[in-house]
Image (tube, coloured by chain):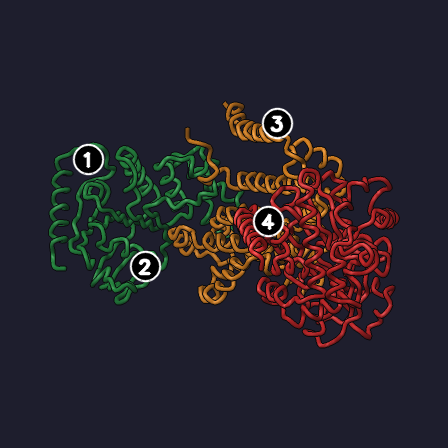
Chain colours: A green, B red, C orange
């Protein structure tokens, strides 16, 4: 059962730029899929189309009716005037759930993302990694079935990134999410996902679909294994081929 | 001509020429008025334009006042040498506050300050004015004779609206009254509004002050009395010539300084000044234009004390005016020649 | 340490201020400058105390006009800014008028307004409002448009109603900009109130400090002029302090502008 589908989608912006041309992808429920490509290849546009933030110029975007989606952007996109608790509360608040009721959901979630005790902290008091954790907590608080993530760890340092990678995999498995993870990092795509969709640049289209055959849970051992290096190389070659392909 | 006489004449001519060539430079004097150039300042411009100031050794610059201009602080600050003021209240205030200036001449024996109103609105009687819904009074008046009007004649602050020297609000509102000079505003009202306004002179109702006074610094009166005397005398002669002689050049100068003024308005104003005896009446007829008497100053002060503007003895009247520069019958002979009535 | 920081924050400007006043006093005394040219601070103080009764009434009137106009400017500015933020068409249509309001000198407008409006207090309020209005409008418009586009997207994803978007996103985003505008307008409102009264002020009870200054000027009571000016300055300083405190209270926790020095 396909949860997220782009069917031969064209997307042209008002500026005349073709972000996507005949782009197609299909993601099953429960999959962890990376969408990999160089800057400007349209992968963020693809994610925004799936999220419903943009409409395709041509072609179809199909999302499973039963799916509930949350989006995590590259910037934590927190409200600077609210503390961690209120930021995580936002989607529930908009849905009409009162603060005290929401607390039952938020408190354990904050603990799960490693922010226990920081309920009252404001974003300007948090590190980059903590802000991203808050953003993820906010995405998870609505108990979504689908998580769309647009290069969420790109702005963080390596150690924090590795930690969050592992945490993300844990949450994926714990909540049985479908995850579409947009990234420009070959290594991150290889580490995290079951499938890597490689995109070619301008205009964007899905050039390759590689399966990553490695068991979960994945850990530092995976990252240092020979198989990982081979996988990364294969993905890298696919990426190069896609990038130098017909424009 | 006999050779000796010829020689004498030549020598005299030579001496004269020599003395003219070596005549002392004119003394620079700055005189600030209290309004834009108008007929009520005519005598001063006359003395400037017909060379009277020059012949008294003075190089005079006249600095006009205007709607938003307040020249008065310039005198004690030393920026100007002589100042025109509109009434004795200014002098009283200065003495009361220890500002060292003093009046040395009073060109107007009668203050032409007046309240004007629309005809046929019941303002023919002065007593009706205090019930006018709107009285357009400018700042200068608001802080001087308006206070007297309130106490002495029952006017109220609620009536007062700022007068910004624009006839519009008065012309537009039949019930409004406004301030003006009896020798000026009625002319403008007739020209712009097409009617002759009712004019009530404050002087006719107890406001017996001198007006268009010349003020000087106390230290100048003390240290350079001859300079003061020359300026006063020349100004008095300027007034005589302006009122009774050929004033065309003075009018032309005033019109250059104040382009909004016309020749008809100036002449009409002069006619009113003469008819109302603003300059040349009372003590001036006997003792010359500019005449001042301590008795009249004291009398006016007493009236103001009665009106509650000052406390008795609050102002040392001996410091208000220096009467030694006037009352010398300057200009009476010139007037005889020009207007031998 | 907190006390040292406080000492530096308040102590330094206070010390400089006291120093300047002392210098002024010394210069006047040593040079024997007469009071009608430059009164010494001591004389100004004595005059202020002696006349405090009547000056206080005028002071209160000026304060009322200033804050009344500021309140109207804030309300009007926010409402109009919201209209502008909602519709670019409205903004393009009305913005030229807003600019005209900003650049027109009050000294010229005040007498004109008086011709049409009967009440002097209303006329003064309008004049002060005109000067105070534009910074609030201009800043709030920018603020309402300044929200992170990603946050806008999130609100769209969460299917927030326009009212929720206004309350939870636009207002908090615009708040720092609004307060910045308010700080500017506070001082301008005071200036507007005083300047308007110079040209349009009436007599009697409805008069503020400007009338007192004029009156003292015309009656050559120079120390009294200075005394009234001192009160105007105090009002300006008070406005500055009040809005700084307000800004700190509303934004202190989270806005970059209110964070303490990073030294």
- In this view of the protein, can residue C74 be seen by the observer? no
Marks 2 & 4, CB-CB < 8 Å contact: no
Q: Residue at x 11, y 40 (%)?
A: A230
- Judge if badges 1 and 3 mark residues of a common chain: no
* Chain designation of label 3: C
Q: Quick check: C29 above or below A3?
A: above
> Of tags 2 and 1, which is closer to the observer?
1
**Discs 2 and 4 lie in a common subunit:** no
Quadrant for residue B257, please give it: bottom right
Q: Quadrant of the C terminus of chain B?
A: bottom right
Q: Quadrant of residue B256?
A: bottom right
Kindly identify the residue that appears in the image at 72 percent across and 74 percent down. Answer: B190
Q: Nearer the viewer, mark 2 or mark 4?
A: 4
- Residue toward you, C240 or B151: B151
Gap in Å between the C-alphas at discs 2 and 1?
A: 33 Å
Q: Which residue is mark 4?
A: C191
């Amino acid at each position: 059962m396909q949860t997220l589908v782009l069917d031969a989608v064209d997307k042209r912006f008002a500026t005349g730029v073709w972000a996507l041309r005949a782009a197609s992808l299909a993601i099953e429920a429960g999959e962890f899929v990376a969408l990999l490509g160089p800057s400007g290849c349209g992968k963020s546009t693809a994610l925004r189309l799936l999220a419903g933030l943009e409409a395709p110029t041509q072609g179809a975007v199909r999302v499973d009716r039963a799916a509930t989606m949350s989006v995590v952007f590259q910037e934590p996109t927190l409200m600077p005037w609210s503390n961690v608790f209120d930021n995580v509360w936002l989607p529930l608040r908009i849905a009409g759930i009162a603060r005290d009721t929401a607390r039952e959901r938020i408190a354990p979630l904050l603990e799960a993302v490693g922010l226990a005790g920081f309920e009252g902290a404001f974003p300007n008091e948090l590190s980059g990694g903590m802000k991203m954790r808050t953003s993820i907590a906010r995405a998870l608080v609505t108990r979504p079935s689908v998580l769309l993530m647009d290069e969420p760890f790109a702005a963080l340092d390596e150690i924090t990134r590795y930690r969050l990678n592992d945490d993300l995999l844990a949450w994926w498995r714990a909540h049985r999410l479908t995850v579409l993870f947009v990234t420009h990092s070959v290594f991150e795509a290889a580490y995290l996902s079951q499938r890597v969709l490689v995109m070619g640049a301008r205009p964007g289209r899905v050039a390759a679909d590689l399966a990553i055959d490695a068991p979960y849970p994945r850990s530092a051992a995976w990252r240092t294994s020979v198989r990982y290096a081979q996988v990364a190389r294969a993905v890298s070659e696919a990426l190069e081929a896609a990038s130098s392909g017909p424009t | 001509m006999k050779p000796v006489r010829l020689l004498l004449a030549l020598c005299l001519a030579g001496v004269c020429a020599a003395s003219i060539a070596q005549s002392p430079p004119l003394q620079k004097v700055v005189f600030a008025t209290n309004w834009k150039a108008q007929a009520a300042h005519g005598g001063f411009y006359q003395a400037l334009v017909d060379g009277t100031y020059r012949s008294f050794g003075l190089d005079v610059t006249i600095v006009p006042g205007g709607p938003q201009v307040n020249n008065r602080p310039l005198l004690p600050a030393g920026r100007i040498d002589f100042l025109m003021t509109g009434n004795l209240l200014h002098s009283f205030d200065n003495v009361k506050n220890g500002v060292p200036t003093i009046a040395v001449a009073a060109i107007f024996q009668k203050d032409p300050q007046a309240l004007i109103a629309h005809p046929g609105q019941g303002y023919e009687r002065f007593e009706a004015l205090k019930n006018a819904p709107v009285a357009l009074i400018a700042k200068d008046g608001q802080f001087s004779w308006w206070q007297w009007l309130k106490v002495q004649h029952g006017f109220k602050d609620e009536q007062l609206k700022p007068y910004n020297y624009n006839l519009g609000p008065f012309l537009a509102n039949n019930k409004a009254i406004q301030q003006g000079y009896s020798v000026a505003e009625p002319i403008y009202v007739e020209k712009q509004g097409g009617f002759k306004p009712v004019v009530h002179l404050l002087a006719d109702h107890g406001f017996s002050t001198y007006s268009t006074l010349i003020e000087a610094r106390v230290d100048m009166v003390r240290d350079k009395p001859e300079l003061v005397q020359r300026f006063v005398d020349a100004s008095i002669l300027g007034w005589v010539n302006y009122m009774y002689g050929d004033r065309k050049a003075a009018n032309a100068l005033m019109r250059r300084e104040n382009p909004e003024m016309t020749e008809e308005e100036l002449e009409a104003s002069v006619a009113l000044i003469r008819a109302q005896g603003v300059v040349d009446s009372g003590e001036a007829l006997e003792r010359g234009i500019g005449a001042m008497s301590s008795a009249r100053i004291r009398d006016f002060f007493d009236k103001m004390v009665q009106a509650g503007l000052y406390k008795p003895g609050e102002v040392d009247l001996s410091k208000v005016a220096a009467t030694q520069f006037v009352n010398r019958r300057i200009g009476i002979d010139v007037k005889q020649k020009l207007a031998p009535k | 340490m907190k006390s040292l920081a406080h000492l530096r924050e308040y102590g330094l400007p206070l010390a400089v201020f006291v120093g300047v006043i002392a210098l002024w006093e010394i210069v006047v005394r040593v040079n024997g400058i007469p009071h009608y040219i430059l009164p010494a601070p001591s004389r100004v103080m004595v005059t202020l105390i002696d006349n405090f009764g009547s000056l206080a009434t005028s002071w209160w009137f000026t304060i009322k006009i200033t804050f009344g106009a500021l309140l109207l400017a804030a309300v009007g500015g926010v409402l109009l800014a919201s209209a502008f933020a909602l519709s670019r068409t409205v903004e393009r249509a009305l913005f030229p008028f807003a600019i005209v309001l900003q650049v027109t000198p009050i000294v010229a407008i005040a007498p004109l307004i008086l011709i049409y409006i009967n009440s002097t207090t209303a006329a003064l309020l309008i004049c002060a409002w005109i000067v105070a209005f534009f910074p609030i409008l201009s800043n709030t418009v920018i603020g309402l448009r300044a929200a992170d586009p990603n946050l806008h997207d999130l609100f769209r994803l969460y299917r927030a109603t326009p009212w929720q978007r206004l309350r939870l996103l636009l207002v908090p985003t615009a708040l720092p900009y609004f307060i910045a505008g308010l700080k500017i307008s506070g001082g301008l409102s005071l200036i507007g109130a005083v300047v308007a009264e110079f040209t349009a002020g009436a007599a009697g009870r409805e008069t503020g400090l400007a009338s007192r200054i004029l009156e003292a000027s015309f009656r050559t009571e120079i120390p009294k002029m200075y005394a009234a000016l001192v009160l105007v300055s105090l009002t300006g300083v008070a406005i500055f302090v009040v809005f700084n405190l307000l800004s700190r209270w509303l934004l202190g926790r989270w806005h970059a502008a209110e964070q303490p020095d990073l030294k």
